[in-house]
Image: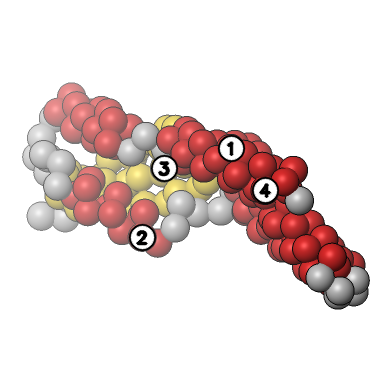
Amino acid sequence: MVAAVVSIVVKEVMYHYTMHFAKVMDSPAFKADAWHHRSDALSSVGSFAGIGLAKLGFPIMDPIAGLIICVCILKVAVEITNDAFIKMLDTSGGKEFEANLKAFVEKQDGVVQVDLLRTRQFGNKIYVDLEIAVDRNISLIDAHDIAERVHENVEKEYANVKHVMIHVHPSEE
């Protein structure tokens, strides 16, 4: 039982340490490894409870604790697998992210409006396709400079954006 307590403490500390860096690096692999530590800690909690209750005269609790641990591990496995599939299937960056990004782009100097915004997530990075309207009376060089500035500012502001493809339209005004 002492070994179970030591395992719980050590594995829980390892979970928090690994999860911290998973968030800092936005790494699904680190997140999965953190959950591996958490599942080890949960297994130890179940072992501790099962052994303890068995010693107190409830031997049936040991296999029941094992089943509960199994269900917890399967739940985490399904969540991690689902997250991996979503990131591999070229899904969007999400409505909240897109709304935030659109507002950010429309605040950039020279941008009249965002005509189209599409995002796709691949791994932990987001690719952005953007069509912006600029003043129709400016030169091609000025329109290009606006697009370059928007591109640079988006990649600087959003660390998870891998690349921005920008098409410029003349505004209707």
Q: Mark 4 points at which residue?
A: 5
> Local crowd at mark 2 within 10 Å, few (<14), some, or many (≥20)?
few
CA gap between label 3 and label 1 equals 35 Å
Sooner in the amino-acid sequence: mark 3 or mark 4: 4
Give yes or no for contact between labels 3 and 4 (Cβ–Cβ under 8 Å). Answer: no
- Mark 1 vs 4: CB contact within 8 A: no
Give the structural element (helix, strand or loop) at label 3. Answer: strand
Looking at numbered disc 3 in the image, what kind of residue is underneath it? Val
Nearer mark to the viewer, of 4 and 2: 4
Tag 1 or tag 3, which sits nearer the N-term? 1
Of the numbered discs 4 and 2, the one sitting upstream in the chain is 4
Secondary structure under the numbered disc 2 in the rendered image = helix
Q: Is mark 1 on a helix, strand or loop?
A: helix
Placement of 11 over or under 79, stated as above or below? above
Q: Earlier in the sequence, mark 2 or mark 3?
A: 2
Q: Give the percent coordinates (x, y) of residue 165.
A: 39, 36
Q: Name the residue under label 1.
A: 14
Residue under the point 30% across and 49% down: 101
Q: Residue at x 55, y 40 (%)?
A: 13
Mark 1 surroundings: few (<14), some (14-19) or many (≥20) residues within 10 A: some
Residue located at (16% from left, 55% from top): 172
* Label at residue 128: 3
Q: Position of residue 59 (x, y in %)?
A: 90, 71
Q: How far apart are marks 2 and 3 (CA)?
A: 14 Å
What is the number of the mark on residue 147?
A: none
* Amino acid type of the residue that numbered disc 1 sits on in the rendered structure: Met
Q: Nearer the viewer, mark 2 or mark 3?
A: 2
Q: In this view, does 78 lie to the left or right of 107?
A: right
| 60 displayed left or right of 7 | right
Quickly name the residue at label 2.
96
Q: Nearer the viewer, mark 2 or mark 1?
A: 1
